[in-house]
Image (cartoon, rainbow, N blue to C red):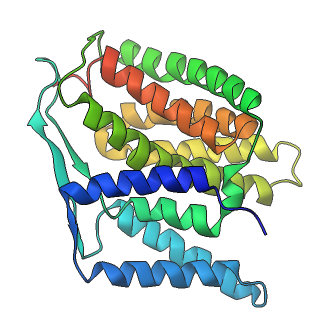
Amino acid sequence: MLALPWTLLVLLSLGYGLALTYGRLGWLALISVALLLTAGFAARQQHIRIGRYLGHALFIFMALALAMHWLPGFYNGRGINPQRFTDDAVMFSMYLNLDKPLIGFWLLLFCPWIVGRRSLRLGIYATAQGLTLSSVLALGGALLLGVIVWAPKWPDQAWLWLFNNLLLVTLVEEALFRGYIQGGLSRHFKHLPYGENLALLLASLLFGLVHLGAGWQWVLLASLAGVGYGLAYRFGGLGAAIATHFGLNLLHFGLFTYPMLAG
């Protein structure tokens, strides 16, 4: 039995508490919780193989529905009203979501193997390498494509953005894309000569595709950033992937146009 990743669970719980101060839950949210628990127990049981597959399939459906805010009972509060952080940026607003973090709770509770524990020294080294690579590829690419420019800033709402991005965005996304998808594919492809590389690239591509709504440029840039996150996860574990992803987001927010140039 794998030990639960208590540090990450505590951080996620702190973020969820922050989100609750801005939003609220309705009783219909219990349906989503019940379905996630059903998926979790089915995925963890060892007696019926098809039951494990069905449990994971139900979770994948629920993860998509929660991420897209399709399910009832979650009244996500707005933490930052629509505004421009720089005059040439598109309008930005931020919600503190109560539905999407349930994905992270499910993964940490029912799939603790996603953490991929490494030593602190190795985690720091992997973070430094992953952040350097993702910054060059993603931020450098964004500058070349003309979707951001140099724009240092620290607005009044920055601290709220920081806590939300770390606890409710980056942690959840890395648990899903690096821990569950990349880690799961690595286990599935372990018999292949380049199985871990294939898992990393597929997870990066999927991560890029979820940014399709922002345009093809962000699909490309997010996929490139995902390569850095994936390498950090591969060599430093989930903590390194979270730190790399958050570090890149923080550099983007604090030093460049956020989220991107208007028109």
Q: Which residue: 77% across, 35% down?
A: 119
For the point 32% across and 61% down, the residue is 68
**Height in image: 89 above or below 193?**
above
Position in image of residue 39 (x %, y %) = 55, 80
Nearer to me, 233 or 145 = 233
Residue 42: percent from left, percent from top: 63, 84
Confirm whether residue 172 shows in the render: no
Q: How many numbered marks, from 0 up?
A: 0
x, y percentage for residue 107?
57, 63
Residue nearest the observer in this picture, 118 or 100 = 118
* Left or right relative to 40: residue 125: right
Q: Residue furthest bottom?
A: 48
The percent coordinates of residue 69 (x first, y second) are 29, 64
113 vs 218, left or right, is right
Residue at position x 24%, y 76% from top?
73
Q: Which quadrant of the figure contains the C terminus?
A: top left
Q: Quadrant of the N terminus?
A: bottom right
On screen, residue 180 above or below 209: below
Q: Nearer the viewer, residue 3 or 228?
A: 3
Which residue is painted at 36% across and 84% down in the image?
31
- The answer to whether residue 204 is above or below residue 23 is above
Residue 156 visible in rendering: yes
Give the side of residue 225 with respect to residue 90, left or right: right
